[in-house]
Image (tube, rainbow, N blue to C red):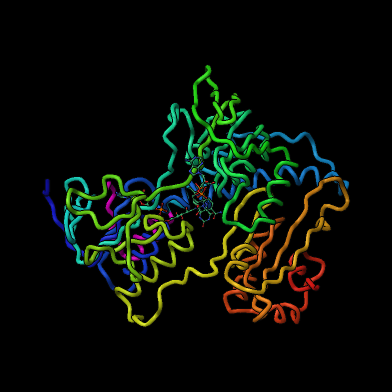
Amino acid sequence: MTSTARHYDAIVIGAGSGGVRAARIAASLGAHVAIVEERFFGGTCVNVGCVPKKMFAYAAGLQDNFTLAADYGLSVGKVALDWDVLRDNKTREIERLNGIYRQLLEKAGVVIVEGSAQITGPGTVQVGELQLTAPRILIATGGTPFLPDIPGRDLALISDNLFYLPQLPERVAVVGGGYIATEFAGILNGLGASVTQLYRGDQILRGFDDDIRNHVAEQMQQQGVRLTLDTDVTRIEAVGEGRRLHLSNGETLEVDAVFYATGRTPKVAGLFAAGAAPALTEQGAVVVNAEFETSVPGLFAVGDVIDRVQLTPVALAEGMWWARQQFGNQRDVPPPSYENIPTAVFSHPPIGTVGLTEADARARHANVKIYRSSFRPLKYTLGNQQHRTLMKLVIDADSDKVLGLHVSGDDAAEIVQGFAVAVVMGATKADFDRTIGIHPTSAEEFVTMRD
Ligand SMILES: Cc1cc2nc3c(=O)[nH]c(=O)nc-3n(C[C@H](O)[C@H](O)[C@H](O)COP(=O)(O)OP(=O)(O)OC[C@H]3O[C@@H](n4cnc5c(N)ncnc54)[C@H](O)[C@@H]3O)c2cc1C
Ligand SMILES: NC(=O)c1ccc[n+]([C@@H]2O[C@H](COP(=O)([O-])OP(=O)(O)OC[C@H]3O[C@@H](n4cnc5c(N)ncnc54)[C@H](O)[C@@H]3O)[C@@H](O)[C@H]2O)c1
């Protein structure tokens, strides 16, 4: 039913990473923009993703520092986690950020419409009773957790739930081997839960460099995570307040909570009225061309919903490019490149990586040279903590170019962000070699690796 109609230059659906950035840039370029949001401003990353996840990852890592402090002669009292304090402090900060995202949009002159949007036809969006029209519509609705269809899957928790748990469960199973599962296993273990990570493949973190995968798996196990590989969950049943998992290896596992982190699928359910949907992939991702336009002229999409690379900085880059392309005068600027996207996994230990894995480099280049260094960082040498760092450079021996740079250990993400600029610029091993190191650091290893 349409009782009110409003016309804009652009309508953005979803106020997450991609949508907020696109709407703000478009408005700053003079466009009259409306943004529709049904749940929370800032989207997944700010509310139930990157930001609260990193806060919890800090909390989990802090536990280690108390042991380290004792090695340095600093005595501390009994260390105990007050889950309610951690959770509620986090929630307060997230609510503050939520308000900031809303204010940023308002200050930029973007019209905020709260509710669930449905695209009803070319250039037309329905939000409850309200009809919005515009020559350009941008879909930035993100993704939603995917859970395999097994009996009892309703008994499983998803990543959103971790951030609001009434209490920290004592025994936890985490299912999956990707970013979220590995980060959550480290967080829960670091906070004191007894954690089993179950993965159907032969090693976690598929797609990352094999040496790095093995290093992280080893270090996690050393820290107390039970890693059960080549195993899937076939059924979940409730046992009192707990959960019994039936495993593909015939065993059962009893836990207080089970988290599923088995991927995220594009969020398009209910988004299109009959006949209004653009072409979608089999997985439901919105198909776009190089300019982010769908099969329906004037209908565009960016971010997780197009399922290219599910990372916040990628959604930001896509949203920004789209807005400048549509409303700015930068028509000759190429779209964001998907080559050499640096990324981090905030596991314990964390991973930072940019460029090709050794296996990918060998598949594409005839002569590949590997430099590898594994060491116990200085910080840990006064005590018994066995934390190690692994660093690896993948070089094209013919051109001397650095094809890949990988690290797993303290500060991995911070280290790789800077080196990523060099890799994107096409730095060679010789460029690395003539760079003087900063001593004593772990990062200096990348400029001192020799044959
Ligand atoms: C646990 C977790 C940890 C993560 N950690 C990281 C990290 O450390 N680093 C990183 O780079 N990435 C991380 N990510 C991924 C990152 O959050 C996403 O890639 C990013 O949020 C995608 O942005 P987006 O704009 O495409 O979608 P989103 O941020 O998901 O925003 C989509 C918005 O659209 C709204 N919406 C959906 N449908 C409708 C509708 N019909 N009407 C109105 N509004 C609608 C949603 O409510 C939401 O606010 C993490 C994700 C998760 C789940
Ligand atoms: N630090 C970061 O930047 C960060 C952190 C979290 C999430 N993210 C983004 O969010 C995305 C989603 O995270 P995710 O961890 O859910 O996805 P993922 O794609 O990283 O991992 C999914 C895991 O689930 C497994 N899986 C898939 N289907 C399964 C099934 N039917 N049964 C058993 N296992 C199955 C996969 O083999 C894989 O190990 C990531 O790909 C990443 O792009 C990024």
Left or right position of 138 against 423: left
Q: Answer above or below: position of 415 versus 89.
A: below
Q: Answer above or below: position of 176 versus 424.
A: above
| Residue placed furthest toward the front | 366
Q: Residue at x 88, y 51 (%)?
A: 382
Left or right position of 289 against 246: left
| Residue placed furthest toward the top | 240
The picture places residue 141, in percent across and down from the top left corner, at 35, 53
Left or right position of 149 against 363: left
The picture places residue 264, in percent across and down from the top left corner, at 44, 47
The picture places residue 312, in percent across and down from the top left corner, at 47, 59
Residue 114: say if magenta.
yes
On-image quarter of the N terminus:
top left
Span colored in magenta: 100-117
Instruction: Judge by depth and name the residue closer to the eye, 280 or 380.
Output: 280
Instruction: Please give the count of numbered marks on the rendered protein.
Output: 0
The answer to whether residue 56 of the structure is visible from this angle is no
Q: Residue at x 47, y 52 (%)?
A: 45
Left or right position of 122 against 362: left
Residue 306: say if magenta.
no
Q: Quadrant of residue 292?
A: bottom left
Instruction: Judge by depth and name the residue closer to the eye, 311 or 235.
Output: 235
On-image quarter of the C terminus:
bottom right
The answer to whether residue 343 of the structure is visible from this angle is yes
